[in-house]
Amino acid sequence: MSGIMEPAETGTALRSPERHGRTGLPQEQAGRDGSVRHILLDAALEVFTERGYTDAVLTEIAARCGLPMGSLFQHYGGKQGLYLALWEEFREEQERRTAATLAAARGSGTDDPVDLFVAGARAYLEGAWANRRLGRLFAEDDGPAGFDVLRRQWDRVWVRRNARLLEVDEKRRAGRVRVRVLTTVIGGAARELCDCADEGEAREIVDEVCGILTHLSTAPG
């Protein structure tokens, strides 16, 4: 999972019933609803992390956050909705982080495709460490039906975005393969970061991976 580039424009077959913070309600009510959604997602993350998606039950999630089951169904429609809302939260935060880094790099005069790619990769990997509880959840092969399809769709999107950032000709097989390899390296490193013992180890991995990406990103000849 590594959306290095600017925010995506993709649609997906699975969606959470309600994108948090976009209710169209009066500000005070929207604020209360936002707080409820945040509490529900925190509780869902705890239970999913401890029990896995399959064994998690809604009654325990509701009990953890002290809210009635009705609130859970009202905001997310059930267990799948909670899981997908957490996925969107993770993905969108990673996009914001990497997009801000790229904008800052371009603003400071950086225009080399490899330098921009590695800067975006570093931001993504640092985000994977900062949001490792969510990353660890999505690294497991235990999600709602259809989630693997959603994740593969997203994988294809960020491969294309990485190709655009690196200015790779996607019509050439060698270029496509190079971008896929780079994308796979980032995704694998992000999963490793989820299990790091401390920040020092995480920083060592990020630095090592960025060095590898710099080497692999340079086109031969």
Image (spheres, rainbow, N blue to C red):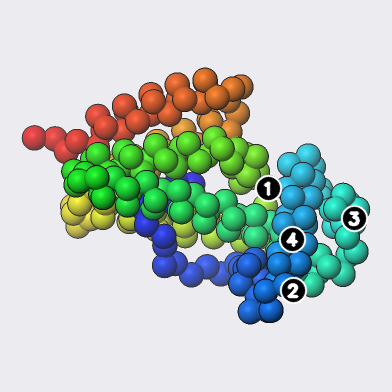
Q: Nearer the viewer, residue 38 or 17?
A: 38
Amino acid type at image mark 4: Ser
Q: Residue at x 74, y 61 (%)?
A: 35
**What's under tag 1, amino acid-wise?**
Asp
From where the camera sits, is residue 8 visible? yes
Q: Nearer the viewer, mark 1 or mark 2?
A: 2
Q: Is residue 141 left or right of residue 211?
A: right
Disc ID at residue 128: none
Instruction: Give coordinates of residue 148: x percent, y percent.
Output: 57, 55
Please tell me how crowded label 2 is: few (under 14), some (14-19), or many (20+) other residues with Cα within 10 Å: few
Counting residues from the start of the chain, the first of labels 4 and 2 encountered is: 2
Q: Position of residue 110 (x, y in %)?
A: 21, 44
**Residue density around tag 1, few if under 14, some if 14–19, many if 20 or more, within 10 Å:** some
Amino acid type shown at disc 3: Gly
- Residue lying farthest to the front in this orientation: 28
Q: Residues within 10 Å of mark 3 (few under 14, many from 20)?
A: few
In which quadrant of the rendered image does the C terminus lie?
top left
Identify residue for label 3: 66
Residue under label 1: 142
Q: Nearer the viewer, mark 4 or mark 3?
A: 4
Mark sitting earlier along the chain (1/2): 2
Outermost residue on the left side: it is 221
Marks 1 and 2, how far apart in space?
A: 35 Å
Question: Disc 1, disc 4: CB below 8 Å?
Answer: no
Where residue 218 appears, x then y in whole percent? Answer: 19, 36
Q: Secondary structure at mark 3?
A: loop
Disc 2 designates what residue?
29
Spatial CA distance of label 1 from label 4 is 27 Å
